Amino acid sequence: MYEDRVVQGRAGAGVLSTNKVIRNTYMLLSLTLLFSAVTAGIAMAANVGHGAGMICTFASLGLLWFVLPRFANQAAGIGIVFGVTGLLGFGLGPIISTYLQVFSNGAELVMTALGGTGVIFLGLSAYALTTKKDFSFLGGFLFVGILVAFLGGIAGLLFAMPMLNLVVSGMFVLLMSGMILFQTSQIIHGGETNYVMATISLYIALYNLFLSLLQLLAAFAGQR
């Protein structure tokens, strides 16, 4: 009897801990997405060029790779997350401005990509949360797939191969969708207990998903 109560107590504590991570992750993710939208709007209003946008993007990657892991378990980690997402949002501003200027239906393309990103995220998250299926087996596949897609994207830019860029964008849509399933599953099953790292992982997936959808929509539905 005593051992059963101990087991039940531990199980209950585990569920509460998981629910707390989920709640904190989605709350922080919502705030960072809103903050990114604000910084993107500022960049667009200030007519920031692509050069400055690229600098902000690289600066955000520096914070993400070299600074955030050291402070992920501290309160300062939250501030760094806002720094990363704010810089990425600022760098996104010039990209969105270009689509609005180049395509007559640019606003429609941006809103469609944004809506598609939201629908995909909510649908996959709801599926992972309700079924509680373990998607940890996707980890290795996603790592290799993202590496291949990243190298393919570089090759497409260096050798001016538009079709390759479209293929890479399609790959990123699938890979980022898989990343949403994987990361949500990690939270549910205790593989990720740090909501700061969970938030940034989901944010990066959404960021790349949005850009990939935008590029695909512009290629197939853009009107110059």
Image (cartoon, helix red, strand yellow):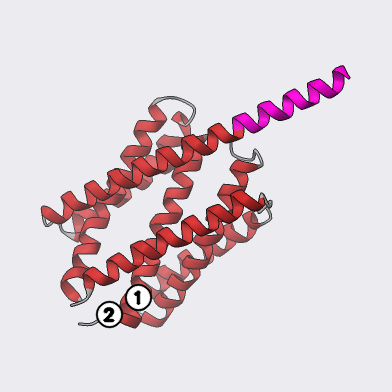
| Position in image of residue 194 (x %, y %) | 53, 34
Decide: is 125 above or below 113.
Answer: above
Image quadrant assignment for residue 60: top left
CB under 8 Å between callouts 1 and 2? yes
Residue 142 falls left or right of residue 168: right
**Numbered range of the magenta stretch:** 1-17
Residue 83 drawn at (x, y percent):
31, 39
Say few, some or many: other residues with alpha carbon within 10 Å of mark 2 (under 14 / 14 to 19 / 20 or more).
Answer: some
Q: Residues within 10 Å of mark 1 (few under 14, many from 20)?
A: some
Kindly identify which residue carries mark 1. 217
Q: Is residue 222 depicted above or below 96 in this figure? A: below
- In depth, the one of 175 and 133 nearer the eye is 133
Q: Which residue is mark 2?
A: 222
Q: Residue at x 50, y 36 (%)?
A: 23
Taking the image as shown, residue 80 lies to the left or right of residue 49, namely right
In this view, the residue farthest toward the right is 1
What is the count of numbered marks?
A: 2
Q: Which secondary structure is most common in the magenta stretch?
A: helix
* Circle 1: residue type: Leu
Q: Quadrant of the N terminus?
A: top right
Q: Residue at left 41%, top 61%?
A: 117
Residue 128 sits above or below residue 120 on the image: above
Q: Residue furthest top?
A: 2
